[in-house]
Image (cartoon, rainbow, N blue to C red):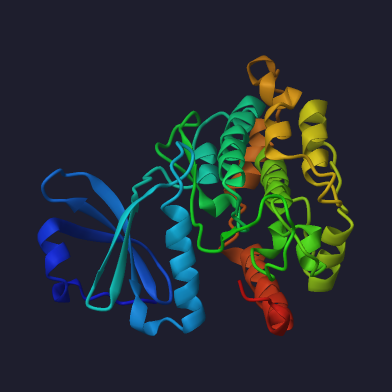
Amino acid sequence: MASIRLREINTLSEEYEFMEDLTKGLFFVVKRCSNKKTTKEFAAKIIHLTKLSAREFNRLQREVKICLKLNHPNIVRLHHTSNENGLCFLFFELVPGGDVFKVLVANDYYTEPEACFAIKQVLEAVQYFHNLNIIHRDLKPENLLTLTKSPDSIIKVSDFSLAVETDGNVFGNFGLVGTLAYMAPEIVKKEKYGKPVDIWCCGVILYLLLVGYPPFWEENKEQLINKIKIADFEFQLPEWNFISDAAKELIRMMLTIDPHKRVTSSAALNHKWIVNNANIVSNLSAPLTLYRLRNFNPKSKLMGAVFVWLFASICREFKQNEIQT
């Protein structure tokens, strides 16, 4: 984990008050901070530039370039950057509500319309950055943040560290990145890919949001990859009896194997389940789904350990084949 000695920072310490750590990585730490003049708060991502490899430095430059282009209510905004004493400071919008699943399960009641409202906001963000020819490549629950702890809170997509720019709708050799449980078939098959990989992620997220477990899961890496390759998932009973047919139809459209036939973000936003959100009659089995969501933590327990092991294994396996971008 990164250790940042802010007493060595002179100029920025005069302008900002740096407070508690929000999260840490190998070469970075994210701290809550506030501007001493305006009292405006930020989430400051502080990176040790001297500890980055050439490849990691190029990825950081790409992340900053992309984030500075983004200005949308459903995307965490990068306000400004600064460098001092070998450290890079990225001042992001502070999003204090936590990730979307923690917020939803913290409430007493969980409805299908709330799930619809959540994924609609994600799709609006995806539509926006796809129109800018940007692919996120790592959409997952941990990267969906909320402003408040209310189910009707604004949701913001975060972490564009793996994002790339593409030439329109052209597919490219962008390499194997992401989180295995959310990877599209074309990625695990080492094929060229493009914007549709983000739609696949949205389909996995929506499935998980509705019933509390992912559509693709095997403790054996190869079996999991094979399931993803052929989109081998089911709407298991009894819980899916409580979900509308329209929701299931949209999930099928998102989890279509052929990326050229997969629904786009614009088409998904015009799907009847999204458009008629206010008229959805929720038959969702709230206690069952809330229990599963409360017990689904991809960073802990057995499932989290296996997720990490699987992703680390597949990255090692294909590392030599990853094409630099």
Q: Name which residue lies at 43% across and 76% down.
A: 26
Residue 279 position, x and y percent, is: 68, 14
- Say whether residue 293 is left or right of residue 22: right
Check the image and report above or below for 161 versus 121.
below
Residue 188: in sight, yes or no?
Answer: yes
Q: Name which residue lies at 77% across and 43% down.
A: 254
- Say whether residue 157 is left or right of residue 47: right
Most foreground residue, 309 or 171:
171
The single residue placed furthest to the front in the displayed view is 167
Residue 104 position, x and y percent, is: 53, 37
Q: Quadrant of the C terminus?
A: bottom right
Most foreground residue, 224 or 125:
125
Check the image and report above or below for 231 versus 48.
above
The single residue placed furthest to the top in the displayed view is 279
Residue 31 position, x and y percent, is: 30, 60
Residue 23 position, x and y percent, is: 39, 63
The tally of labels here is 0
Q: Quadrant of the N terminus?
A: bottom left
Residue 244: in sight, yes or no?
Answer: no
- Say whether residue 155 is left or right of residue 188: left
Residue 46: quarter of image: bottom left
Most foreground residue, 168 or 17:
168
- Say whether residue 270 is left or right of residue 102: right
Check the image and report above or below for 306 versus 263.
below
Q: Name which residue lies at 58% across and 56% down.
A: 297
Q: Name which residue lies at 50% across and 70% down.
A: 59
Residue 221: quarter of image: bottom right
